[in-house]
């Protein structure tokens, strides 16, 4: 079975590094995008992602705008949004999960496994 692939959309190089290291150690393949435009390019290349983790503080558009685009163009793709700000209850319902920063890497792996249908596989 091939590794599940996660698209991480975050413009912070340190967080990109943390996500990549955490997810690769968890057995996932990872692609990174620093903004919504790049994420849309990668997503337009075909159905190769199993999950998206998107920061709400993106440099080109608000993160919720990316989530709305994902819901319109990839409605079955699970989405985790991450932010250091409290979630807006109305907007938070458009994502599958809201991850508050700072986060524990164990929590990221648990959520990704759960949303990828691998809850028993995360170890």
Image: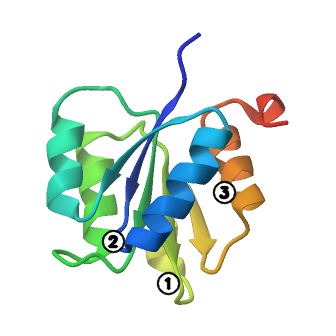
Q: Name the element at disc 3.
A: helix
Which residue corresponds to mark 1?
88
Residue 86, quarter of the rendered image: bottom right
Q: Residue at (48%, 61%) from the top-left corner? A: 17
Which residue corresponds to mark 3?
108
- Answer yes or no: is residue 17 visible: yes
Query: Dot 2, crowdedness within 10 Å: few (<14), some or many (≥20)?
Result: some
Q: Name the element at disc 2.
A: helix
**How far is the residue under mark 1 from the one under mark 3?**
20 Å
Q: Is residue 54 above or below residue 8?
A: below
**How far is the residue under mark 2 from the one under mark 3?**
19 Å
Query: Dot 1, crowdedness within 10 Å: few (<14), some or many (≥20)?
Result: few
Q: Which of the two labelled residues, at mark 1 and mark 3, occupies the earlier sequence position? A: 1
Q: Which of 28 and 45 is in front in this view?
A: 28
Q: Residue at (23%, 55%) from the top-left corner? A: 69
Of circles 2 and 3, the one toward us is 3
Q: Name the element at disc 1.
A: loop
Residue 117, quarter of the rendered image: top right
Q: In this view, does 121 lie above or below 97?
A: above
Q: Do the residues labelled 1 and 3 touch (CB within 8 Å)?
A: no
Q: In which quarter of the image is the N terminus?
A: top right
Q: In this view, does 109 lie above or below 46?
A: below
Which residue corresponds to mark 2?
64
The colour scheme is rainbow
Q: Residue at (78%, 36%) from the top-left corner? A: 122
């Amino acid at each position: 079975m091939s590794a599940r692939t996660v698209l991480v959309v975050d413009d912070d190089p340190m967080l990109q590094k943390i996500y990549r290291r955490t997810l690769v150690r968890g057995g996932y393949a990872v692609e990174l995008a620093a903004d919504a435009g790049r994420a849309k390019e990668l997503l337009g290349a075909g159905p190769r992602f199993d999950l998206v983790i998107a920061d709400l503080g993106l440099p080109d558009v608000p993160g919720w705008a990316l989530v709305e685009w994902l819901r319109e163009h990839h409605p079955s793709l699970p989405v985790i949004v991450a932010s250091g700000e409290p979630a807006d209850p109305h907007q938070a319902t458009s994502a599958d999960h809201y991850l508050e920063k700072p986060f524990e890497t164990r929590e990221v792996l648990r959520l990704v496994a759960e949303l990828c249908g691998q809850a028993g596989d995360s170890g």
